[in-house]
Structure formats: C-alpha cells, structure tokens
Image: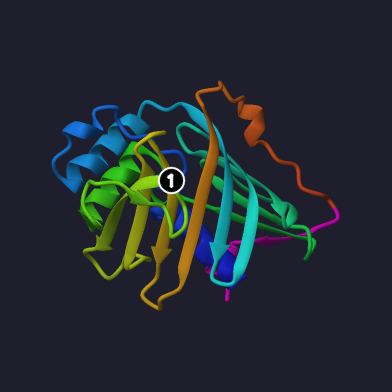
C-alpha cells in the first residue's frame, strides 16, 4: 500500500510529465536546460492523446503494461505484469485495481493535485525545481551498453515540500520523445519509468477511461490518507 502511494505521487508530482512529452523540433536552437524544458512543455500542450508501453521499477517492485493519456487529465495504465492490475485517473477520481489482493483503491483527487501531466503542471515543475543538463546538450547513451542516445535533464527541488529531491529525464533526440524518468525521494528511494512504442494523437475515446472493476473485490476509499 505504501509503495502504491509513492508510485501515485510520482505520477501526480512530476514523473507523469514524462509519459510522452515530445520535444520541439527546434531543439538544436536551445541554449539552456530551462529553455529545453520549456520547449517540452510547449509542445506537450499540443498533444491531444497518446498510448505507450511502460516499464516501471518502484523500489524492488517491477511492473509492465501500457499507458493511455488524453487531455486534459485522463490517465490509464493497464498492466500485463502484474496481470490485470489497472490504474485509472479520470480527472477527478483515482482507481487502482489489485487483482492479487482482490482490492479496489479509490481516492478523490482535487484538480490542483493532478495537473502535473498538463501544461499547468509542467509550469509548476519549472517553479519548484531547478533544471540543468546532466552532461550538457550532447547526446549520451541511454545506459551502459545501449546504443540509443539521449539528452539528460536533472530537476532538483527548490522547496522541501516536494516529494522528490531530484528527477532525471532522458529525451531521445531522434524520436523527440522522453524515454526514461528516474525520480528519487529524499530517502533515496527511486522510481524508474521507461517508455516505448508511442502512438500520438490517435483520437482516443473517452470510453477508454471508464473502468468497471470486479464487483467481488473489496473497495477501500481515501487510501492515500490512510495508514
């Protein structure tokens, strides 16, 4: 339960910004990391919807699945590992279905708390995090032994109230998409998101973000604020 809370906070406090944030085509003209980040935010404001494969490592837990997003704030994750696990946010309510526990976790979320995957949310990230290049604008391997090249940004919090002390964002200059997000808490707990196989602006239906969990599962409300 605690890990799920941390994972969701990743989604709504900055890490979710990396779920398909294309970079503006004029990246070669960018001079500073802040301008580079702003170009991501500006272009993201033009994206209507997307789907992508996602691979998540949360502390010692590993998950795989597909993420779907639609403006302004609808997000869904359907997992293949663990099978049938689902995370849905429709702009007002967060629903998490845990098939292994036969449990449904529900939480009403205020608009202001769930805007990090929107232009407003990205603006808040710019306000509360200092942005820098990790190694400069020159692309480097995504990871050791991987031939894919990325540009790495490091976001470091300006205020102690932010959930993550720093966030690393890896952008592919070839595809102009974010490939990896690593968010680290002050306790040095990291959450890593890999994204691949993007499909942008496919006119996703609102029906995609409706979910009817099994009636046999037990429902737990306000789980983010429970012990």
Examine the rendering and report whether any part of residue 141 can be seen. yes
Q: Is residue 222 magenta?
A: yes
Q: x, y (%) of residue 91?
A: 51, 41
Image mark count: 1
Residue 188 placement: quadrant: bottom left
Residue 157 forms part of the magenta stretch: no
Residue shown at 25% from the left, 35% from the top: 39
Q: Is residue 10 above or below residue 69?
A: below
Residue 201 in picture, x, y percent from top left: 50, 23
- Is 201 left, or right, of 81 in this rendering? left
Give the residue number, with chain letter if any, for mark 1.
148
For image coordinates 24% across by 46% down, the residue present is 138
Instruction: Give me the residue at 44% from left, 51% from top.
Output: 180
Viewer-closest of 205 and 68: 68
**Residue 107 falls left or right of residue 29:** right
- Compared to 163, does 37 lie above or below? above
Magenta extent: 216-227
Q: For the residue labelled by badge 1, is the local secondary structure a helix, a strand or a loop?
A: loop
């Amino acid at each position: 339960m605690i890990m799920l809370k941390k994972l969701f906070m990743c989604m709504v406090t900055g890490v979710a910004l990396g779920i398909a944030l294309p970079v503006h085509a004029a990246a070669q003209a960018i001079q500073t990391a802040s301008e580079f980040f702003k170009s991501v935010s500006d272009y993201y404001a033009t994206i209507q919807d997307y789907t992508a494969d996602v691979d998540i490592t949360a502390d010692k837990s590993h998950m795989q699945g597909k993420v779907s997003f639609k403006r302004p704030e609808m997000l869904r994750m359907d997992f293949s590992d663990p099978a049938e696990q689902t995370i849905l946010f429709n702009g007002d309510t967060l629903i998490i279905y845990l098939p292994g526990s036969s449990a449904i976790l529900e939480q009403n979320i205020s608009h202001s708390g769930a805007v990090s995957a929107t232009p407003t949310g990205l603006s808040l990230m710019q306000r509360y995090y200092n942005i820098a290049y990790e190694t400069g604008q020159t692309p480097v391997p995504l990871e050791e032994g991987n031939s894919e090249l990325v540009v790495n940004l490091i976001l470091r919090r300006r205020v102690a109230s932010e959930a993550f002390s720093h966030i690393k964002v890896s952008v592919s200059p070839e595809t102009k998409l974010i490939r990896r997000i690593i968010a680290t808490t002050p306790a040095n707990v990291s959450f890593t998101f890999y994204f691949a196989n993007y499909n942008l602006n496919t006119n996703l239906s609102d029906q995609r973000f409706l979910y009817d969990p099994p009636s046999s599962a037990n429902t737990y409300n306000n789980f983010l604020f429970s012990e």
